Image (spheres, grey):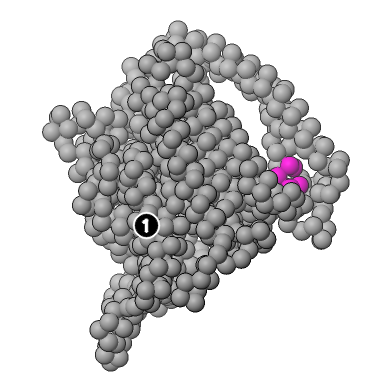
Amino acid sequence: MTDAARPASPIAATARSQDLKFYAIWLIAAIGLVALPMIFPSGGSLTSFSLIGISIIFALSYNILLGQTGLLSFGHAVYYGLGGFAVVHMMNAAAAHGWPIPLPFIPLFGGLGGLCFAAVIGWVMTRRAGTVFAMISLGIGELVASSSLILRSLFGGESGITTDRTALPHMFGWTFGPQIQIYYLIAFWVMIAAIAMYALTRTPFGRICNAVRDNPERVEFIGYDPHVVRYLACCFSGLFAGIAGGLTAINFEIANSAYLGAVQSGLVLFATFIGGTAYFFGPILGAILVTYLQLGLTSLTSVWQLYFGIIFIGIVMFSPGGIAGILMMHRPLIRAGTLRTVIPSYLIALLPTLVLICGVILGIETIARYTANQGEGNAINLFGIPFNATAPSTWIVAIAMIVGGYLVARLTWRRIAEAWDRATTGARDRGYLA
Amino acid sequence: MLELIVISTLNGVLFGMLLFLLSSGLTVIFSMMGVLNFAHASFYMLGAFFGYQLTKWIGFWPALILAPLLVGAIGMAVERYGLRNTHKHGHVAELLLTFGLAFAIEEIVSMIWGRSPVDYRVPELLDFPAFTIFSTNYPAFKIFMLAVSVLIFVVLLIVLKRTRVGLIVQAALTHPNMVAHLGHNVGRVFMLVFGVGCALAGVAGVIAGPALVTQSDMAGLLGPILFVVIVFGGLGSLPGAFIASLVIGLIQTFAVALNGSLASAFGPLDPSMGSSVLTDIWNVTIAQIAPILPYVLLVLILIVRPMGLMGTRET
């Protein structure tokens, strides 16, 4: 369910001001994208923004399948990677033959690559939904990833295929050599793709996708074939994933078999699900968070992937709506003005929960350093406080923080649940919550 | 040629039985709870690493018993505290939970034991050639692996078909509510089945560890093949899983042993044509495409028979 899927509630403002608000959000997003490099002009942050932009398109394309059509795919990187390869081959061909295709149009060919593969393989894949679809997508993903190492002339084997983005005809005098120009190219495509995908959720096709997700049998009764709907969703998803892959290939000037692999598929699933699949902006939040963490954590710790796994398991178990779901849960409370009943219990729970999290981090880091380099220095520097991985005191502190933090935090979580009940009852009484 | 056929058949059946040790647990868990345990191959990997560590501490034979028990206990904890709480959010959430778990287990294993292969050796008692066929020594440990897998297969069959426990498990597969009304704790039955399935994966890990490579990516390598096996055999069908395990085991083993390519069969292509996709396909050997054969089979069976070999339901 997208946030727009809900009919405007009677208390909400008129449709006209809703429209204004809607256009304002997109306008603010566009201005933000233009202004970002002026606020953070360093090379490192430009690279980060570019990667975040790409992963936003990728995660949104994944949500066409997972959130809107209810198809869980474990092989989404296939379209992304093939889009990347399509772009690299197109750029090399255009440069070799002197075709007048400027770089800004090149990602379209990536989308075309993803779309073509989805159109071919999607018909077999989408025959069944649910668990079987998940397994098939995993198998196809492995098939393509392994085949890419065999078909060396097309995929370049282990090393991949390189390209030169400045060799193409220039446009508006932009060479697309410097990262800032690539950033604006990516930002432009993020806007285009996001608007297109949002528009897609508002079309009758987008609605039928939601219906197929919720009750395929009923959809058949009203005369639609769920298989065809799933197939079309798969094609659209492949198109946008291909655009994301193409932008990556332009950004790094290389495409290799890692683009197609299971790691890439796993990351996009993490980003989309952590962000929240039920709202359109969920995957955007998730993509920003996961890419930012990925870039930030790799330099801090060797076991950053473990933290991803733990965050993901936590979200699946305790908040299947993702971050967007948690945020949107508070909307009726804000409208009804009962949010202040919940906030004190949040503040009380904050401290023991933080202690618990720090304990877990300390425990993981201690084990990681203890086993990784037993001979070398075992000093851990956590939030500026040094620890020694071999000292028993470190282990005791970690265990005490985990156990103590958990016991106290559990009490405060119960308080939150009680306060939450009171707040939602209040909101329901005032008619802001069904 | 005959030598190749005999040895490959032996190895293929062995690999197939190993696959079945894993896929049987996966299939029973799936048909009981509707959950495809994505982390099943990770439990296999845990079995191998526990087996390695316990062998270092207390020897191989105690490890063969203890490591699967440990893995089974972890499996039961996962069912009790993870899956049971996630059940209310639906099957996709459960599948995602096991996916996250598989990811986390791989990271934990590589954090503790490192990313390079560990030195997990065949126990000395079994470190001799069992027999010699056509100048090839066949190691006794492989015979032992085969014997253990067949033994577990037989025991599993007897327990499921001939005992009261098996009767309850079978009934809980199809009529969980009725079984609960008769006074059985269905939740506990689920937990036990999940634990036993994981323990079987653990056994497979302990005995496969010394023969194959014990490394932190072994779950990631075997996992997808395992899912191919159960989709190929038909989701939820135990006989289907058995046939599919043997078929895929044999196909992969034979493919690895064969060195032919289209170029060796029909002669090399004209070199003036240059390098293209066609030359890649023309020159690739059967051994090189062995890793992708299971997935090709998967696509083929989905086109020909979407419910799998022995599957009945078209979910």
Q: Position of residue A164 (x, y in %)?
A: 43, 76
**Is A105 included in the stretch rendered in magenta?**
no
- Which element is circle 1 on? helix
User: Against A69, is A160 above or below?
Assistant: below
**Is A365 included in the stretch rendered in magenta?**
yes
Q: Position of residue A275 (x, y in %)?
A: 48, 39
Q: Position of residue B208 (x, y in %)?
A: 55, 55
Can residue B131 be seen in this snapshot?
A: yes
User: Of all residues shown, which one is farthest toward the bottom?
Assistant: B272
Instruction: Name the subunit of mark 1.
Output: B
Magenta-drawn segment: A362-367
Residue sitting at 57 percent across and 53 percent down? B207
Image quarter of the N terminus of chain B: bottom left
Residue sitting at 52 percent across and 29 percent down? B192
Q: Quadrant of residue A434?
A: top left
User: Against B181, is A57 above or below?
Assistant: below
Apparent side of residue B252 relative to residue A380 in the rendered image (left or right): left
Apparent side of residue A346 relative to residue A201 in the rendered image (left or right): right
Q: Main secondary structure of the magenta part?
A: helix
Q: Which residue is mark 1?
A: B248
Q: Nearer the viewer, residue B238 or A342?
A: B238
Apparent side of residue A293 relative to residue B14 in the rendered image (left or right): right
Q: Position of residue A51 (x, y in %)?
A: 50, 57
Residue sitting at 55 percent across and 55 percent down? B144
Q: Nearer the viewer, residue A221 or B270?
A: B270
